Amino acid sequence: MKGRVYLVGAGPGAPDLLTLRAADILRRADVVFHDALVHPETLALAARAEKVAVGKRSGRRSTAQKFINKRLVDAASRHATVVRLKGGDPMLFGRAQEEIDALRRASIDFEIVPGVTAATAAAAELGVSLTRRGLSRHVALVTPRAAQGERGNEWAAAVLAADTAVLYMGAGLAPAISAELIARGMSPDTPVALVENASLPGRRAVLGTLAELPALAQRAGGGPTTVLFGEVLKDAAVAEEIEGLLRRA
């Protein structure tokens, strides 16, 4: 027997941002291998499935990717519907290609089910479009992190070349990120926003400038945080100031 493996995007957190297709597959699942930050209500949709935690968190002990690959292949020989449930969208910083390659080598059928990614969820929280006619026609989605043994990546060059940039898994490196971008010529006054727990009840956003990024990051809690750069964020800063004045009034 060879089942089908579904690589499913769980979205940024809120269970009601899950796609209809993803919800249907979870209800039919026999086994679900899920990330650490998937919402309990999302997992609850897989009522009949065995649930296996295989999440990764930066700076913490996590499940080796090769082990996850093997578990998926093994599960497909025993179950009809196997789900690999990933935070956000599987195809963005989710190491999906390694799992896809393992499934192809084993001749196992698979399907990708997209999800809402952190960049668009963060933009929604801020009420700011990542693109804007005449101001932002180029958006970069990057991460400054590289796994042990991997070559460094040119994340800074990508940020500098974009009109708007979104950094994944970067809040913990805020001092180094700020210093690197300023050293490469980005203005210290470039608008910056950090959005924590986008789409969830405990969501929080802080706005400032590139020079202030290290201090802004210190105000974040332990939730997943996305860092945004670009002139489009000026509207968010103005809105925050107006709303703050209204609240004080």
Image (cartoon, grey):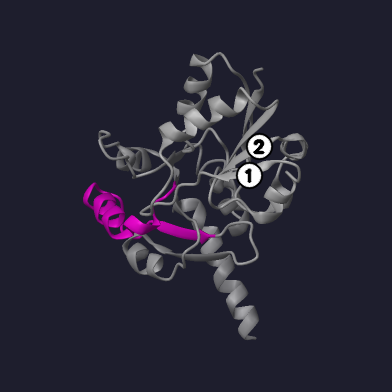
Residues in magenta, as a range:
167-196
Distance in Å between CA atoms under marks 1 and 2: 6 Å
In the rendered image, residue 190 lying in the magenta stretch gets the answer yes
- Cβ–Cβ below 8 Å for labels 1 and 2? yes
Residue shown at 72% from the left, 50% from the top? 44
Q: Quadrant of residue 239?
A: bottom right
Q: Is residue 156 above or below residue 240?
A: above
Q: Earlier in the sequence, mark 1 or mark 2?
A: 2
In the rendered image, residue 107 lying in the magenta stretch gets the answer no
User: In the drawing, what numbered circle is on residue 31?
Assistant: 2
Q: Looking at the image, which is closer to me, 235 or 43?
A: 43
Residue 198 located left or right of residue 163: right
Residue 165 located left or right of residue 46: left
Q: Is residue 68 visible?
A: yes
Q: Which residue is mark 1?
A: 51
Residue shown at 32% from the left, 40% from the top? 146
Helix, strand or loop for disc 1: strand
Helix, strand or loop for disc 2: strand
Q: Is residue 5 above or below residue 133?
A: above
Residue shown at 48% from the left, 22% from the top? 102
Q: Is residue 134 above or below residue 16?
A: above
Query: x and y percent of residue 227 in the render?
Result: 44, 54
Query: x and y percent of residue 140 in the render?
Result: 44, 39
Q: Label 1 crowding class (10 Å Cα cut-off): few <14, some 14-19, many 20+?
A: some
Q: Is residue 96 visible?
A: no
Q: Quadrant of the C terminus?
A: bottom right
The amino acid at mark 2 is Val
Query: x and y percent of residue 207 in the render?
Result: 47, 65
Q: Looking at the image, which is closer to me, 120 or 98?
A: 98
Q: Is residue 166 above or below residue 137?
A: below
Looking at the image, the residue that sits furthest to the left is: 183
Query: x and y percent of residue 144 in the render?
Result: 34, 45
